[in-house]
Image (cartoon, rainbow, N blue to C red):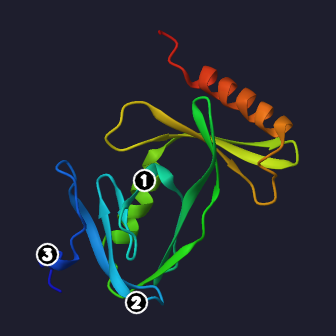
Amino acid sequence: MGLFSRKPKLPQAARPPLTADERVLAWAAAGNGEGDGVVVASNLGLWLPGRGHRIGWHDILKAVWSGRELTVTPAEALVERDGYTVVVDGPAEPYLLLDPGELPHQVRARVTRSVAYTEHHPVPGGAARVAARRAAGVDGLAWTVRLDPGTPADDPELLAETDRLVTAARAATAPANL
């Protein structure tokens, strides 16, 4: 490709059902072992082959680029609490990208930019990460507690501790002039 050449436009047949305020930032043809498709990064999130919906940037716990493969780990909601959600890692989804272009960079930048606050804490039965994420197109922050693998989600002591940790984190991050 020359200096001023651009990646071809996303074919209409591969275009996900974007909302009126959504635009494509980058895309790449992908294979994940279950057939091929297209991975599309938009200003609001990531469209993955085989899913009929977008994953918001704030709902992606991890995105790892190996140089050939993009592996996305979405959050899986376990429990809705007052003002936050307890989540665990969903199944990692690998996508082989033969011509990745700007896609890995956009994914990394958008996932990283969504993080407003993050802190890891010991909790009863294990450990958890308290996080506040910016959701594209939404005012305010989405608070989550991501349980480390092996940490039991149904322990009342754990939930009381996560309530306390989120309350403390909100107080620590609230603007002083409000």
| Residue mark closest to the camera, 1 vs 2 | 2
Crowding at mark 3 (Cα within 10 Å: few <14, some 14-19, many 20+): few
Alpha-carbon span between mark 3 and mark 2: 19 Å
Find the residue positioned furthest to the top.
177
Distance of label 1 from label 3 (alpha carbons): 23 Å
Horizontal and vertical percent for residue 29?
31, 83
Secondary structure of the residue carrying tag 2 is loop
- Dot placed on the residue nearer the N-terminal end, 3 or 2: 3
Q: Compared to 178, does 164 lie above or below?
A: below
Identify the residue shown where x is 40% and y is 70%.
51
Q: Is residue 47 visible?
A: yes
Label 3 sits on what residue type?
A: Gln
Q: Quadrant of residue 46?
A: bottom left
As drawn, the label of residue 112 is: none
Relative to 97, say whether 158 is above or below. Answer: above
Element carrying mark 1: helix
Q: Which residue is mark 1?
A: 57
Of marks 1 and 3, which one's residue comes earlier in the chain?
3
Q: Secondary structure at mark 3?
A: helix
> Does 7 sit left or right of 159 as displayed?
left
136 sits left or right of 33 in the view: left
Instruction: Give the mark nearer the N terminus: 1 vs 2.
Output: 2
Amino acid type, mark 1 = Trp
Is the Cβ of the residue at disc 1 closer than 8 Å to that at disc 2?
no
Residue type (three-letter) at the residue carrying disc 2: Gly
For this rendering, which residue is in front, 176 or 137?
137
Provide the residue designation for mark 3.
12
In-front residue for pair 78/95? 78
- In this picture, residue 130 sits left or right of residue 150: left
Image-quadrant location for residue 121:
top right
